[in-house]
């Protein structure tokens, strides 16, 4: 296999570890924990894993005398830079507990456990993936582990392979399911432990104990490099407005972080739109006014960042999307009728099936967007927001609004816009030093939790804006992060999703600067991620983390 010169050099990179993980580890038990809300219900659903104490690792325990054991690992959901390092950190951690320990990878995501698709991860095989991006070491998938028959199949497979613990590397939903699995395995006395690791570029799996999900750092740095390059181009040619949609599903953390890194002219934050109940027309008007103001200063160019999930946060669009989700739910008579119609007749039919208000909103949308809203739902029955071209919708609507402003003598500029969508470009990038170090530490932490018989915990590494040797590793009971939420008509225990909070330091900073950035051209050009060079450049954390931790 040919590999790049960078990959060759990166293969030799030794991830930095918290001090406590460099030798034998002592586990310190903290206070008993409680779930973030709905304590009585969560306790009832998780009688065996509720209330466990926080765990912190310190230097200086006894060297391990553990008997050899086997572990299985699963990558779940969307790719995020650093996944390979969680696995190499886990592998090395297991081997240092006992060189006879074996690590198996379940192939293609959680489905691999249920279908018994696996491979043994040997030293040579793992070495080839150290410090690389992607999830291709064992593949990922979005199968949900939530049915008892799946759990029971998992026991069969684990028993066959002598596996005593499973590590699930995933987002909030996958870790919720990991906790359900841990509880079930305890209840059934299977002897199989389950440990989670916090993954997702979206940055929405974070709380008091989990400072960030891995992959967010690298993905935001890649997008910020690209945004910076576009800004340089815009500022050179001075003739285009660039509307840039950024991945992140519901939460706008990625958009916010990229804005903090690049200082664009416009940044939309979905959570703010929802809180202020802004209509689509108001958003368009807000953007058009900034464009007009810049034009008054002779600047017919600019950049606008648009979060992927925006459309679902605009109240009238949310109602419409909910109605469409119900109408077009898979397997229903309505869905069959819809699909049996000629394509040209489908939109009219939809209008006749939804409420009058929603039909009006639907009717005002450009045809392309209306069609995208009726595309197949994801496995959870939701519209696939990454497929809705919100950036194009906004360009079309802003153009119309500017024409009206021109008519009224309030706009004298020229508007020529280009659209972009950054998502897949960053999800498999070679992990930044931060993600390489953080992920390797998370993997190591998971090995220690397993070696100490823990289950129902998520590996946690904190104090992440300090140098890596001061990071604090340990375990957080997953039940501590849970609350009850309505999902598809039923109340379910889930890890609380972290959306952008308007009272958070990162958002407040953006809010204090955005008027200035709108009018002035205050662009910052971060350039590409640096893997070699001064620590002040290579080991920089996200602005979000710095601001959250008062730096
Ligand atoms: P996870 O939450 O599983 O980490 O996925 C993140 C994400 O990249 C979202 O930002 C995006 O909306 C979605 O995955 C795209 O899904 P897919 O990979 O199936 O196209």
Image (cartoon, rainbow, N blue to C red):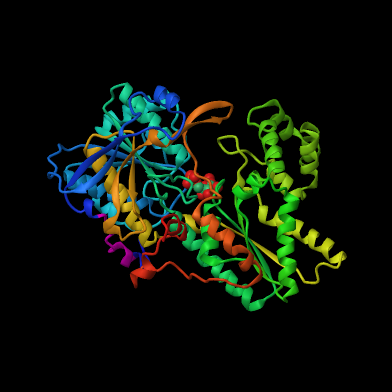
Q: Is residue 344 visible?
A: no
In the rendered structure, the answer to whether residue 33 lies left or right of residue 324 reads left
Position above or below: 549 against 68:
below
Please identify the quadrant where the C terminus is shown. bottom left
Q: Position of residue 110 (x, y in %)?
A: 41, 37
Please identify the quadrant where the N terminus is shown. bottom left
User: Which residue sits furthest right?
Assistant: 407
Q: Position of residue 159 (x, y in %)?
A: 27, 28
In the rendered structure, the answer to whether residue 3 lies left or right of residue 316 reads left
Q: Is residue 179 visible?
A: yes
Q: Is residue 321 magenta?
A: no
Figure label count: 0
Q: Is residue 11 magenta?
A: yes
In the rendered structure, the answer to whether residue 215 lies left or right of residue 257 reads left
- Provide the residue span drawn in magenta: 8-18
Q: Residue at x 72, y 75 (%)?
A: 297
Magenta segment main secondary structure: loop
């Amino acid at each position: 296999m040919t590999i790049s010169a960078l990959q060759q050099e990166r293969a030799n990179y030794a991830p930095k570890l918290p001090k406590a993980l460099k030798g034998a580890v002592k586990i310190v038990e903290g206070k008993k924990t409680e779930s973030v809300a709905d304590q009585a219900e969560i306790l009832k659903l998780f009688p065996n894993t509720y209330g466990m104490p926080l765990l912190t690792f310190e230097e200086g325990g006894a060297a391990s005398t553990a008997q050899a054991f086997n572990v299985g690992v699963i990558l779940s959901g969307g790719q995020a830079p650093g996944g390979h390092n969680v696995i190499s950190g886990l592998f090395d951690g297991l081997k240092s507990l006992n060189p006879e320990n074996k690590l198996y990878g379940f192939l293609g995501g959680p489905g691999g456990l249920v279908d018994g698709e696996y491979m043994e991860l040997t030293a040579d095989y793992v070495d080839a993936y150290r410090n690389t991006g992607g999830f291709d070491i064992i593949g990922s998938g979005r199968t949900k582990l939530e049915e008892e028959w799946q759990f029971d199949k998992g026991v069969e497979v684990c028993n066959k392979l002598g596996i005593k613990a499973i590590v699930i590397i995933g987002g909030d939903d996958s870790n919720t399911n990991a906790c359900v699995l841990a509880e079930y395995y305890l209840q059934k006395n299977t002897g199989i432990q389950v440990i989670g690791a916090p993954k997702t570029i979206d940055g929405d799996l974070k709380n008091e104990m989990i400072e960030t999900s891995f992959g967010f750092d690298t993905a935001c740095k890649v997008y910020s490099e690209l945004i910076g390059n576009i800004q340089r181009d815009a500022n050179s040619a001075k003739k285009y407005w660039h509307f840039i949609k950024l991945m992140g599903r519901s939460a706008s953390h990625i958009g916010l972080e990229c804005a903090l890194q690049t200082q664009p002219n416009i940044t939309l934050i979905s959570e703010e739109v929802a809180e202020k109940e802004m209509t689509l027309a108001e958003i368009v008007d807000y953007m058009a006014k900034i464009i007009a103001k810049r034009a008054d200063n002779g600047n017919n160019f600019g950049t606008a960042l648009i979060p992927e999930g925006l459309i679902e946060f605009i109240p009238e669009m949310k109602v419409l999307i909910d109605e469409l989700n119900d109408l077009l739910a898979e397997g229903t008579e309505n869905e069959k009728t819809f699909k049996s119609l000629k394509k040209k007749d489908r939109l009219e039919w939809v209008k006749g099936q939804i409420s009058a208000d929603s039909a009006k909103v639907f009717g005002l949308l450009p045809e392309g967007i209306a069609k995208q809203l009726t595309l197949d739902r994801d496995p959870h029955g939701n519209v696939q927001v990454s497929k809705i071209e919100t950036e194009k919708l906004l360009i079309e609507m802003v153009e119309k609004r500017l024409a009206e402003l021109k008519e009224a003598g309030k706009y004298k500029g020229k508007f020529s816009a280009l659209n972009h969508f950054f998502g897949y470009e960053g999800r498999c990038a070679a992990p930044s030093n931060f993600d390489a170090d953080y992920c390797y530490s998370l993997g190591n932490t998971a090995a220690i939790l397993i070696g100490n018989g823990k289950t129902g915990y998520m590996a946690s590494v904190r104090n992440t804006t300090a140098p890596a040797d001061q990071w604090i590793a340990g375990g957080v009971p997953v039940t501590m992060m849970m609350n009850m939420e309505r999902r598809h008509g039923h109340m379910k225990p889930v890890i609380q999703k972290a959306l952008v909070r308007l009272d958070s330091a990162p958002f407040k900073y953006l809010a204090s600067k955005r008027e200035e950035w709108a009018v002035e051209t205050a662009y910052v050009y971060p350039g590409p991620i640096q893997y070699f060079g001064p620590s002040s450049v290579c080991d920089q954390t996200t602005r979000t983390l710095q601001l959250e931790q008062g730096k």
